[in-house]
Image: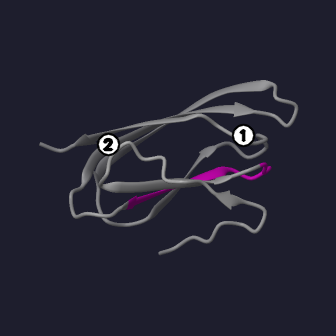
Amino acid sequence: MIVAAPTYAEKSGNISLNEDWNVWYERGWSDEPVVFHFENITDRPAFKIRALVNCYDRDGKYLGRVRFEMPGPIHKYLIPKQIVPKGTKKMEAEVYNSWEYAP
């Protein structure tokens, strides 16, 4: 399943810290939740994905940090996940993610 980015959004570059994954999000301002797209480009499943997102309003006021965690195993499917609540202005967010693999 492929989810198209809205016309107002710009697709970010790959923000993954792991070479087995492509992770991207829709950049720019929106009143809708932010969707992160996780795509495994190998057959090696992830055990867990974690991300922290710092959010700001259009005036640059810090709105807080949103934490996201998805348990695994996560395989080769694109998984859109909304992690920033509706009504939050977005954000050129700083994104941190880490990847743990099942033993």
- Horizontal and vertical percent position of residue 85: 68, 42
Q: Pointer 2: what residue? A: 48
As drawn, the residue found furthest toward the left would be 103
Of the pair 13 and 73, the residue shown nearer to us: 13
The residue at 25%/63% (across/down) is 42
Amino acid at the residue labelled 1? Met
- Looking at the rendering, the stretch of residues picked out in magenta corresponds to 29-39
Dot 1: few (<14), some (14–19), or many (≥20) neighbours within 10 Å? many
Circle nearer the N terminus (1, 2) = 2
Find numbered disc 2 in the image and state the secondary structure of the residue it sits on: strand
The residue at 79%/41% (across/down) is 89
93 on left or right of 13:
right
13 on left or right of 20:
right
Q: Is residue 66 above or below residue 25?
A: above
Find numbered disc 1 in the image and state the secondary structure of the residue it sits on: loop
- Horizontal and vertical percent position of residue 93: 64, 37
Q: Residue 63 is drawn in which quadrant?
A: top right
Mark nearest the camera among 1 and 2 is 1
As drawn, the residue found furthest toward the right would be 59
